[in-house]
Image (cartoon, rainbow, N blue to C red):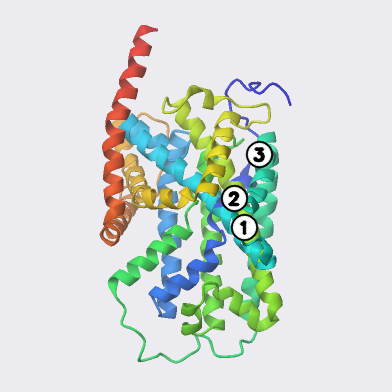
Amino acid sequence: MADATATNGKLLKQLGFAFAAAIGLGSMVGAGLMRTSGAVVDQVPHPWLVIALWALGGVHILLAANVASELVTTIPRAGGIFVPVRAAFGDSMGLLVGWAMYLSVVAACAALSIVCANFLAILQPSLADHTAPVACLFLIPLIILNWLGVREGSVAQTIGSAVKLILLCVVIGIALLADPPDPGALSAAADASAPALGVFAVITAYQMIYGAYAGWDSAMVFVEEDENALTNIPRAMALSICAVALIYVLFNIGMLRSLDLEAIRASDLPIALVLGNIFGTVGAAAVAVLAIILASTSLNANLMIAPRVLFGLARAGLFLPSATRVNAGGTPHVAFAFTALLTVLLIFSGGFEFIFRLMAALIIFSFVIYDVSLFQLRRTRPDLPRPVRAIGYPVLPGLLLLIDTALLIAFIAADPASGLYMAALIAICIPVGFVLHRRRAALVVAA
């Protein structure tokens, strides 16, 4: 390998529109879709409302991408959503949002590795007692691939996302076109005995759907590596979100067409029942293979994202300066090594589950602050160049802020402990951010 610092701490512009779209699709669509669909129906056993909620989730995320398109092109620096938050509100909020996003992505890497191992155990039951080592067997080749450089990782991601899209289209086509053995929920007559629909059940279902769209903002992390970022990133976000929303809606229509409500609510993997009814035992194996492909492409995406968030934090003075080093292939290799080590530790310790609980409300809070940063930067930095402006400002961004704030309040009401974790982390980050800012200011004066 060439000198690891050959790029002098600069990321390489080697990416384009295809990768930006692929990383968005690859991050959003994971194996969790197959479990989330059934869990949503369990909360809201009303087929057309389920479909409407999945479609509404797509509209919600498009509103978010509208805001993001302005912010990422106004301040086109690697690191993701913490970059404009820090510019608008200072180091404390930047520290909070940046580390919340980084740790959640690393936890996702560990969880996706475990998912791959769990589904492989369905195909080979003897592996069921060796989940952590098998998970690392999925992780390590991707670590090696991405260590080589951004081009290698991007090619793998683009091919993986394309394969994922094709396989999902095949599964959706089968579910929509094959004749089910029994009438599905969509064709069944309305059941008068269906449970009454509660507000909290709808909120819980929508929170799961919102989580299924997580990763929609992935392309922004690579803004410094895209050869035409100011055009590619906004367009790729819009395209990937629309494609994923369509996939989610059609996936659920196919499931509801093929299975009755009780079968869906009783199953952890309803799509396995759909394919099993058509192909028998081969269908269950096909679902396991599909899940591994979905999870592994999402794993590669998250492995590419996390080091760049840490790179951005380090460059902003919110982590060790050595994490800004970039190898000859364009990978922030120190940040990547730290990410890989932390992921392995979380796999063997199970600590990713604690991080998810710790960060649950904080992630939603981070996006609320991100929404507000658009208004703050418009007010305090009107001089900044804005190649892309949020459509419908201030109405549509204001609507997004109201939706995200309502979602945060509902989440904390449903899980008060998560709200307490969020408050504690905010209380910690405010003085830490203040100290970091004072220290950096002193160094500037001394220089």
Dot 1: element? helix
Could you tell me how far apart the alpha carbons at marks 3 and 2 are, in whole angstroms? Answer: 12 Å
Decide if residue 10 is on the left or right side of residue 387.
right
Dot 2 and dot 1 residues touching (CB under 8 Å): yes
Left or right of 365 on screen, residue 289: right
- Callout 3: helix, strand or loop? helix
* Foreground of the two, 18 or 309: 309
- Which label number is shown at residue 116? 1
**Quadrant the N terminus occupies:** top right
Question: Disc 2 vs disc 1: which is toward the camera?
Answer: 1
Residue at image mark 3 = 146
Rendering quarter of residue 129? bottom right
Label 2: element kind: helix
- Which numbered disc, 3 or 2, marks the residue that appears first in the sequence? 3
x then y, percent, for residue 431: 27, 29
Query: For the residue carrying disc 2, how many other residues have a C-alpha within 10 Å: few (<14), some (14-19), or many (20+)?
Result: many
> Residue furthest toward the top?
446
Q: What mark, if any, has residue 299 been given in the picture? A: 2
